[in-house]
Image: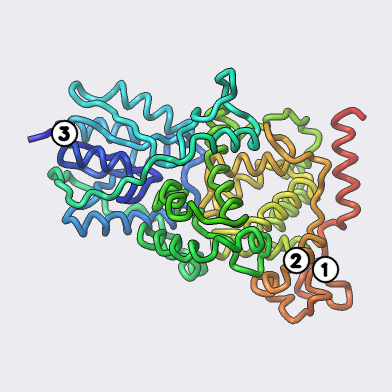
């Protein structure tokens, strides 16, 4: 009999195109394991929306193995300690896992490699991205920092590897004791704030495939529709990709060969996911520290003033007085997701209209986004802030009111800001005093005033 093979699941909660699972199933009887480890990430442990999604995704994964008369062993605690203990208890020949690039997971993988009992090895696989970081390098062998040359270089490696089918049959090792998922209290109860998310999402590997099938019929329109919040022009695959309920390799092979700008634009966004990991691999603290060292004098710190804290909370709650910003922030709270164009508008508003450090926004997104990703969030926020290795210039300040009108966001605002639902298209984007309802807040700051304040603060920081 072959030795048991432990499969360590993290953000790769699927059976198909799961390299670690496929290799383990070929080598011997498997023991699927998920460890809820809140200690290693520190203050980057899973946020509230993360935990809600994780509960349902683990339920889905368990049902997937259940169809093969198996189950997932759930444990809570330090990942390395739990896996070492299981490997010793089971006499495991290997622990298989897909590589993860968050710094706490890289550290855990190194520790686990050295801590496993004799005769048990850690086998790492590449399964979460189109290509592993370091695939595309400059002529001198250095990793790229800027997206466009990275994208062009990565395309030279296309196509990505073939999709790996799910094993038709599994042999399971005798499972040791497992936690009960409900005992982890991942779901909100007092209060239960997840009703909007339950209505908005289907979760799990089957739901991810269903969404991909839907997207295959709509991706041709992506270039035209992706910036229009009132149209469901986004794939909404991002949380399925984040949690690994489907892989980017599966998405690429399902959609490749299509002609038109829609697919090419969407393909570039799959590459952007790889780019974010490429940046994180070079700069492990990128989501915590500005790449360009902007002086702290640029930012209005919410910890130093009651009024500034109130403005941050108004942004978080969708009470800025800017309808497009408020619609996005309320969509985020209600559904755990926000339209991609509105994410940029809302982020720019926090950073440049309110002059609040991008990290406050990143942390709010971390807690409220079901697709909140350590690398992608950090790269996106630093791009908007102008502090990133590859970023927009700080002095390019988005005008949320004109953006709302340009991208025809009226129906989107009516859906998520019901106080404004009765306004016509002439007023919905920027209601004047006569038409602004009494229960809708005044602007925190006028656009012209905010723009001049931001540019002045930037010039002062630069010493101009």
- Of the numbered discs 1 and 2, the one sitting upstream in the chain is 2
Q: Which residue is mark 3?
A: 89
In the rendered picture of this protein, how many numbered marks are placed on residues? 3
Q: Nearer the viewer, residue 285 or 240?
A: 240
Q: Are marks 3 and 1 in contact (CB under 8 Å)?
A: no
Q: Is residue 335 left or right of residue 94?
A: right
Q: Residue furthest left?
A: 1
- Of the numbered discs 2 and 3, the one sitting upstream in the chain is 3
| Vertical relation: 317 (above or below) 74 | below
Where does the image place residue 279, in percent across and percent down from the top left?
58, 32
Element type where label 3 sits in the image: helix
Quarter of the image with the N terminus is top left
Where does the image place residue 38, in percent across and percent down from the top left?
42, 41
- Of the numbered discs 3 and 1, the one sitting upstream in the chain is 3
**Mark 2, other Cα within 10 Å: few <14 / some 14–19 / many ≥20:** many
Give me the C-alpha separation between circle 1 and circle 2: 7 Å
Q: Are marks 1 and 2 in contact (CB under 8 Å)?
A: yes
Q: Quadrant of residue 117?
A: top left
Q: Nearer the viewer, residue 260 or 462?
A: 260
Q: Nearer the viewer, residue 113 or 47?
A: 113
Q: Residue furthest bottom?
A: 422
Where does the image place residue 81, in percent across and percent down from the top left?
30, 31
**Mark 1, other Cα within 10 Å: few <14 / some 14–19 / many ≥20:** many
Give me the C-alpha separation between circle 3 and circle 1: 64 Å
Q: Residue furthest top?
A: 140
Q: Is residue 191 visible?
A: no
Q: Is residue 207 left or right of residue 415?
A: left
Element type where label 2 sits in the image: helix
Q: Which residue is mark 2?
A: 323
Which residue shows up at 57% across the image and 61% down it?
A: 220
* Numbered label attached to residue 430: 1
Element type where label 1 sits in the image: loop
């Amino acid at each position: 009999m072959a030795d048991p093979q432990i499969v360590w699941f993290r953000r790769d909660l699927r059976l198909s195109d799961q390299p670690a699972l496929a290799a383990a199933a070929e080598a011997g009887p498997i023991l699927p394991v998920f460890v809820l480890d809140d200690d290693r990430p520190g203050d980057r442990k899973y946020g509230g929306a993360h935990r809600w999604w994780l509960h349902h995704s683990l339920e889905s994964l368990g049902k997937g193995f259940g169809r093969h008369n198996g189950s997932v062993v759930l444990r809570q605690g330090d990942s390395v300690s739990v896996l070492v203990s299981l490997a010793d208890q089971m006499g495991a020949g290997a622990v298989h896992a897909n590589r993860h690039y968050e710094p706490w997971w890289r550290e855990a993988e190194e520790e686990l490699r050295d801590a496993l009992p004799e005769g048990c090895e850690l086998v790492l696989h590449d399964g979460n991205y189109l290509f592993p970081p370091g695939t595309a390098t400059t002529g001198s062998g250095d990793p790229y920092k800027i997206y466009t040359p990275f994208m062009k270089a990565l395309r030279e490696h296309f196509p990505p590897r073939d999709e790996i089918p799910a094993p038709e049959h599994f042999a399971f090792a005798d499972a040791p004791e497992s936690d009960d998922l409900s005992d982890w209290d991942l779901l909100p109860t007092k209060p239960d704030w997840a009703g909007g998310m339950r209505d908005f999402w289907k979760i799990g590997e089957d739901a991810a495939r269903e969404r991909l099938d839907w997207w295959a019929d709509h991706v041709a329109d992506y270039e035209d529709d992706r910036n229009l919040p009132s149209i469901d022009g986004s794939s909404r695959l991002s949380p399925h990709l984040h949690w690994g309920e489907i892989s980017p390799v599966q998405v690429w092979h399902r959609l490749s060969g299509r002609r038109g700008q829609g697919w090419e634009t969407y393909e570039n966004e799959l590459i952007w996911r790889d780019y974010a990991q490429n940046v994180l691999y070079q700069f492990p603290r990128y989501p915590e520290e500005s790449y360009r060292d902007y002086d702290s004098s640029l930012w209005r710190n919410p910890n130093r003033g009651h009024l500034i804290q109130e403005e941050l909370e108004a942004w978080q709650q969708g009470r800025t007085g800017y309808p497009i910003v408020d619609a996005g922030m309320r969509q985020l709270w209600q559904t755990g997701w926000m339209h991609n164009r509105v994410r940029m508008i809302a982020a720019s508003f926090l950073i440049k209209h309110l002059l609040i450090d991008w990290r406050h926004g990143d942390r709010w997104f971390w807690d409220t986004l079901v697709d909140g990703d350590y690398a992608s969030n950090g790269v996106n926020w630093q791009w908007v802030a102008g502090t990133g290795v590859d970023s927009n210039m700080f002095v390019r300040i988005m005008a949320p009111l004109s953006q709302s009108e340009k991208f025809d966001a009226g129906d989107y605002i009516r859906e998520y800001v019901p106080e404004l639902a009765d306004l016509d298209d002439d007023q919905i984007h920027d209601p004047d005093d006569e038409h602004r309802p009494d229960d809708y807040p005044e602007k925190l700051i006028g656009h012209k005033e905010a723009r001049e304040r931001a540019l002045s603060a930037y010039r002062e920081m630069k010493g101009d």
